Image (spheres, rainbow, N blue to C red):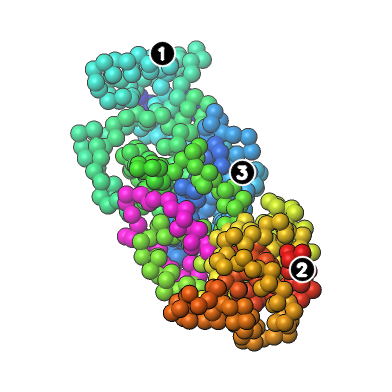
Amino acid sequence: MDYQKLADLMFPHIDKDIDYYEKLYPERNLPEGAIVTRFSPSPTGFVHMGSLRTAFIAKKISIDTNGVFYLRIEDTDDKRSVENGIQGIIDDFKNFDFPIDEGRISETEDIGNYGPYLQSERAAIYQTYAKHLVKEGLAYPCFMTEKDLEEIRHVQESKKERIGIYGRYAKSRNLSLKEIEQKIKNGEVFVTRLKSPGNFNKKIECVDLVKGTIEFPENDMDVILLKSDGIPTYHFAHLVDDHLMRTTHILRGEEWLSSFPIHKQLFEIFNFKLPKYCHVALINKKDGNSIRKLSKRKDPESALSYYHEKGIPVKAVYLYLMTTANSNFEGWLEQNPSGNIDDFKFDFKKMSSSGSLFDLEKLLNISKNYISRLKALDVYNNVLNWAQKYDNDFYQIIAKYPEYTTAILNIEREQPKPRKDFACWADIKEHIFYMYDELYDYNKVDFTSVNNADNYREVINLYIDKYFEETDDKETWFRKIKELATELGYAPEMKLYKENPEKYIGNVADISNILRVALTTKTTTPDLYEIMKLLRKDRIKARFIKICG
């Protein structure tokens, strides 16, 4: 067989050899140990939480080693691609504050010297490498039709044999050059298949960075490298792109683990250095008494849009994802509650090989801690941006009162143990609405939830007439609350009430709660003194008078 002639016959339009591309994309000039890795989604829908987690880990290890993280779009499957899928992926990353070092940044633009980073723009590159394999006698044109493939599958299933094209089922493998020439002349459609040198009875090893050493049978399948339109399959594009982009580490979902024998073989027949692999376990979810994969169809929290709509800070999400990625991160975070996640060093050995359970409550708790450490002005700016998109009525109010709103958000914030009321920006309105006359509703004032509040009118009126003074400091204010309690027959100290409850109508906490509910409609709020200090005397009196009639 004249393999050079066969290669020219199959790829007459390819006039370069692989040396051209090897020089065009040289080894990267990076520090020793630098990791080059990527995220390579298909434009088949939105980026989901599992994908973000994999991309996040990949980016983290590149940062830790002064390496490179790039975004490559694998758009070779037209049937599964969705409209605006590429821009959707790019937007998802931008909206999640996820900058890339290289890669696709718009429908038409790349940054970086190792592109194009859109696979559909790399057809000539793939065909050059496929032509090289044909010249080496390691690939061939396969003219089998869909009907031929169906018949082979039927035979294999009936004999309980492995499904695929290998051995005697690779019917186009041994066609003569003359037969191939005639078929091409006749316009018969062909795909380019690998002429696998593998032996299924031989074992190979995958040394996975998380799962350890796994044995597989060597690949002996003549897998398709290029489809009939010259577009590569995932397997072949994976080889060419990761080699030319000088990828050192490949992080991908564990569902791709079974493809490792094919990929290892492709790297070996080209004599390319095999990247290190990390097959990331799935993110699971508890569903009743069972555990299943987090689903794009069933679980709203799988979509990144869910976190935007709720207003869960992106950095809080990343903190949570790190707890699922490295088992020692939570301990580190407890020791460094204000620490930068970049200061934590990712360790493959601390990564679970069996999957992580997605825990939304844990994420929200982490988010509460994160938000509690922010400055009030940062919280204001974030909730303002969120409300502008998702709650215009609230936006109009807080935009009208920026300094006042910031002061509200600062109540019990700058202290050793700040309040942790807000898990997301969407929570804030429910927690502070009563501070705005536009949102406060007298009709929602209900004293039935307050102990010993039957005489709430007497409590409120006496407070206004005798004890309310806007200039009081906190100590004086609380002393007067105690005096009010005593005058009306309530215990001024909780200890006294517990010792002799029969002597009192109630206790000082009941007095505070009557005032609290009257002003806020809520039984639980931040510090009442701070609330009253911000509401000011005229508004407080107006609310009290309205309630008491």
Q: Secondary structure at mark 1?
A: helix
**Crowding at mark 2 (Cα within 10 Å: few <14, some 14-19, many 20+):** some
Residue position for label 3: 88
Classify residue 224 by image quadrant: top left
Disc 2 and disc 1 in contact, CB within 8 angstroms: no
What's the amino acid at mark 3?
Gly
For marks 3 and 2, the one nearer the N-term is: 3
How far apart in space, not on screen, are marks 2 and 1 (Cα)? 86 Å
Rendered residue at 76%/72% (across/down): 541
Between disc 3 and disc 1, the foreground one is 3
The furthest residue to the left: 201
For marks 2 and 1, the one nearer the N-term is: 1
Rendered residue at 58%/78% (across/down): 489
Tell me the tag on residue 283: none
Q: Secondary structure at mark 3?
A: helix
Specify whether 208 is left or right of 317. Answer: left
What's the amino acid at mark 1?
Lys
In the depicted structure, whether residue 160 falls above or below residue 80:
above
**Crowding at mark 3 (Cα within 10 Å: few <14, some 14-19, many 20+):** some
Over which residues does the magenta segment extend?
A: 340-368
Q: Secondary structure at mark 2?
A: helix
Tell me the tag on residue 147: 1
